[in-house]
Amino acid sequence: MDNIVALAKRRGFIFQSSEIYGGLNGFFDYGPLGSELKKNIRDCWWDDMVRRRDDVVGIETSIIMHPKVWEASGHVAGFTDPLVDCKVSKQRFRADQLFFAPVVVEGKTVGYVSALESENTAGELQAAAETFKRKKAIQGQLLPVQPRDMTEAQPDEVAQIPSPATGEPGSLTPPRAFNMMFETNVGAMRDASSVAYLRPETAQGMFVDFKNVVDTGRVKLPFGIAQVGKSFRNEITPRNFIFRSREFEQMEMEYFIHPEADWLACHEEWLKWCQDWLVSIGLPASHLSLHEHPKAKLAFYSRRTVDIMFRYPFGVQELWGIAARSDYDLKQHQQHSGVPQIYFDEATKQKVVPHVIEPAVGVDRILLAVLCAGYAEEEVKDEKGNVEKRTVLRLSPRIAPVKVAVLPLLKNKELLVARARELYGRLKRKYAVFYDDGGAIGRRYRRQDEIGTPWCVTIDFETIEKDGTFTLRERDSMQQKRITEAELFALLDEKVY
Ligand code: GAP
């Protein structure tokens, strides 16, 4: 992971926000290559989800909405994470990410150990229990630890669990609900009547505009409303680089279906669509898996949620949530606004409140997944047969920030440069292209490998003296072949869509 973060910074993909002031935890900036990559992910999703489908339309709603939206949606009351404070260090932890276990020797609890969630939480707790027993010189057999998280701690246990910040018991508070919405004030008055929220999900925009779209969009059930935009959550523990941040971007789609439609079948269809789409932008299917939320842990609006999980270097984590939200949201808004959220079904002549299937994904999480899956360090031979290290980002041509690098073999040969510039100009009209005439050709290839450019074309003497073809060098195989300009455009047309 450290290598990926270092590459992201070194090559201008991602920077810490406000870095010159020491950064702000949970906020990030995207540099020149990062913003191209992010835009490409967003555009691919929009093209496939909205433009290439007949049953989905797109909208863009405001980030700050009427505060009643969030009362109706349930976010004011229920959009919380369980929080535990350490009174000594003043650090805060998410209770469901802070694990503890009693240290049990010869059947008797002799103390407690704690650890923050990691790939090996149980192992860390076991090691801590052994250390505890050794330090206290307790004799007898230590039982294997039984980890639980702080949401499961009994009141009498809380005082005995050591804080991960200090290693000492007595400073942790019992878990309490912490609302993750960022508050702000609208207008000149700063009082309770002016409180508003930065949206914690884009989804509510689609529900609140449901009637507007139905009345103006000529949509027929089943149909979807999609949106891409920023969301904000005051996460207690932003972590794993851009995986969990406080400002992030979501791509969500609410698919409205007839209340009597087979919602389970529809949910399965979208689950498949989302997995196929991730593979289409280059994520290996072998890194994906599914996680069905247990009934007891479903979000307040959901009757079924399945997450598409991705194998990140820091563990298997949620990438895309596909939830069956029933008619929860439209009914809530109908009740709170007093405006009927009704669809008139011509086929059955029924007035219905549709049900919803919602695939919701974060752009930043996809971007991190493609960086992690694509990053590789390899040993390769240079032109002289010497072994050297190459860092390569195997990004799909669909999303790679630069599609082609144009390289004149020599920068001081006017004819080569002129031909390379011509080609560069023509390619640039349609694609993100990079012109590089600095240094040995092998080094130029390496620079492009590191930023994920799928192809390099080299303009050489054969180009100008013989048949006009140039060398096409492919990033992953590193193979080279002669190609005409028409063939290059055909290749790009096929692979970049
Ligand atoms: N409208 C439903 C909803 O927002 P969610 O599971 O809370 O559901 C959907 O969020 C997706 O948004 C997640 O699967 C994840 O990809 C992304 N996401 C959520 N919180 C995030 C955060 N703090 N940082 C980055 N991405 C986040």
Image: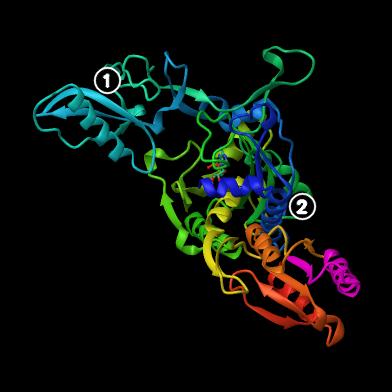
Q: Nearer the viewer, residue 427 or 181?
A: 427
Q: Position of residue 417 (x, y in %)?
A: 87, 70
Label 2: state its secondary structure.
Answer: helix
Q: Is residue 41 above or below residue 420?
A: above
Q: Is residue 120 a member of the stretch shown in magenta? A: no
Q: Quadrant of residue 175?
A: top left
Residue bounds of the magenta highlight: 404-429
Q: Which mark is residue 138?
A: none
Kindly identify the residue that appears in the image at 45 percent across and 63 percent down.
286
- Can you tell which of label 1 and label 2 is closer to the viewer? 1
Q: Is residue 355 visible?
A: no
Kindly identify the residue that appears in the image at 55 percent across and 53 percent down.
369
Q: Quadrant of residue 442?
A: bottom right
Q: Position of residue 168 (x, y in %)?
A: 32, 18
10 Å crowding of disc 2: few (<14), some (14-19), many (20+): few
Kindly identify the residue that appears in the image at 71 percent across and 57 percent down.
401
The residue wearing badge 1 is 157
Look at label 1 and name its amino acid. Glu
Kindly identify the residue that appears in the image at 57 percent across and 56 percent down.
370
Q: Position of residue 394 (x, y in %)?
A: 59, 63
Q: Is residue 417 a member of the stretch shown in magenta? A: yes
Q: Nearer the viewer, residue 152 or 449?
A: 449
Q: Earlier in the sequence, mark 1 or mark 2?
A: 1
Q: Is residue 237 visible?
A: yes
Q: Is residue 302 above or below residue 423?
A: above
Label 1: state its secondary structure.
Answer: helix
Q: What is the distance, in whole Å, between disc 1 and disc 2 at their CAs?
A: 57 Å
The residue wearing badge 2 is 217
Q: Position of residue 252 (x, y in %)?
A: 62, 47
Q: Is residue 346 above or below residue 114?
A: below
Q: Nearer the viewer, residue 136 or 410?
A: 410
